Amino acid sequence: MICKTFRRYATIMSVLIMTLTTINPAAKASSVATDGLLSAVYVYDGSKTKYRDEDAAAIDQMFYAFALFRGGRLSTSHWKNVKAFKAYLEKHPHITPILSIGGWGADGFSQAAATDEGRKTFARQAVALMEEYGFAGVDIDWEYPGLSVAGIMSSPADRTNYTLLLRALRSNLDALTEADGKPRRLCIALSGSPDLISNLQCSEIGAVVDQVNLMTYDQQMPGIASHHTALYASNPQALSASAGLQAYVAAGIPAAKIMLGVAFYGYRWRTNESEPLYRKATQKDTLPYTTISKMIEKRADADYYDATAQAPYYADGKVFISYDDARSIEHKRLYANEHGLMGLFAWSYGSDATGTLIGAMRGR
């Protein structure tokens, strides 16, 4: 129980912080999570992201996605909206910017990692782009080593070559830091599914990278109205963030380097069921949380929460939507704290115009 004196002190401090923020908006942006957890978001260049100054205090890192292989070289020639990203960082310099390379369907990793010269070239190009745009780190989003499901090239040798590629990057980043004293962060994004662990040398990877963004979303069951970003499994066949995390830790990725994934979007299914969860349905499309929140405002009776999975869903008899909300993110944050994780990250910033989800990531 919190004593009255502490409550009175907390109230005074809250008023003081609000006053300082009104006088100087940057004061709020310098806030730090009391539980020590990091909060990160991906920004997708392909969408015209609207940046909210009031969100800045809840963000520690921003990943700019994606640099791609073009003609065998890393390129950002397709970027259209990076100026707005850089302008936001100038206003909020406490946010660490990180260059993200790859993404779903991005080919070129297997080829670049196949030889020593290819790995050295990739590392040089990645670091050069990082320096050119003023990023403080590199994020490798290879989806996925040893697997061609996204239409990319793959090889059984990817398992070893992926580690070697990361070591080449680590060497180049460390050389820069040794020269100027500025830390550079090496991050990777990994599937939240334990099924892909066999394609990775997790212990070796865990020793090389600074941060692992575990993509604990897009985990819905095919042809079934199901959660896509649940913390726990409420169905024997369902994937979950907790199960994925535990599998990666057991395989050798340090828990303290893992960021748990949060979805700022939802999957929509067509259904005729009044209670559609875990019943056959037709997956239709994705929706940003901004749209989902407006639907809930109109139909509060369609807002449900699976307490076993710690996951919300929308069901109105015509559609079923799986997504994250403030409740589920709060539980993910508590889970991250209890299990000694690095923090939470989200795909993707700009999909929630309400600021609700980014606030929940920070624990406010």
Image (cartoon, rainbow, N blue to C red):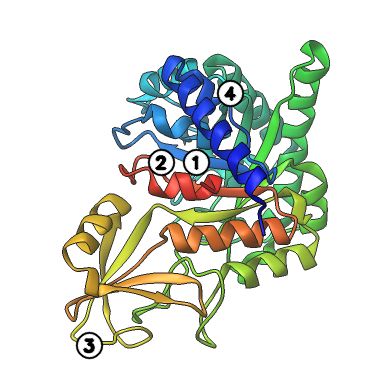
**The label number, if any, that marks residue 94 in the structure image:** 4
Q: Does residue 61 appear to the left or right of 120 in the view shown?
A: left
Q: Is mark 2 in CB contact (under 8 Å) with mark 1?
A: yes
Label 1 or label 3, whichever comes before in sequence order = 1
State the SS at label 4.
loop
Amino acid at the residue labelled 3: Glu
Question: Which residue position is annotated with label 1?
Answer: 41
User: What whole-number distance in Å separates the C-alpha atoms at marks 1 and 4?
Assistant: 14 Å
User: What whole-number distance in Å separates the C-alpha atoms at marks 1 and 3?
Assistant: 35 Å
Label 2 or label 1, whichever comes before in sequence order = 1
State the SS at label 3.
loop
**Quarter in which the N terminus is drawn:** bottom right
**The label number, if any, that marks residue 25 in the structure image:** none
**Can the viewer see residue 114 in this picture?**
no
**The label number, if any, that marks residue 273 in the structure image:** 3
Q: Nearer the viewer, mark 1 or mark 4?
A: 4
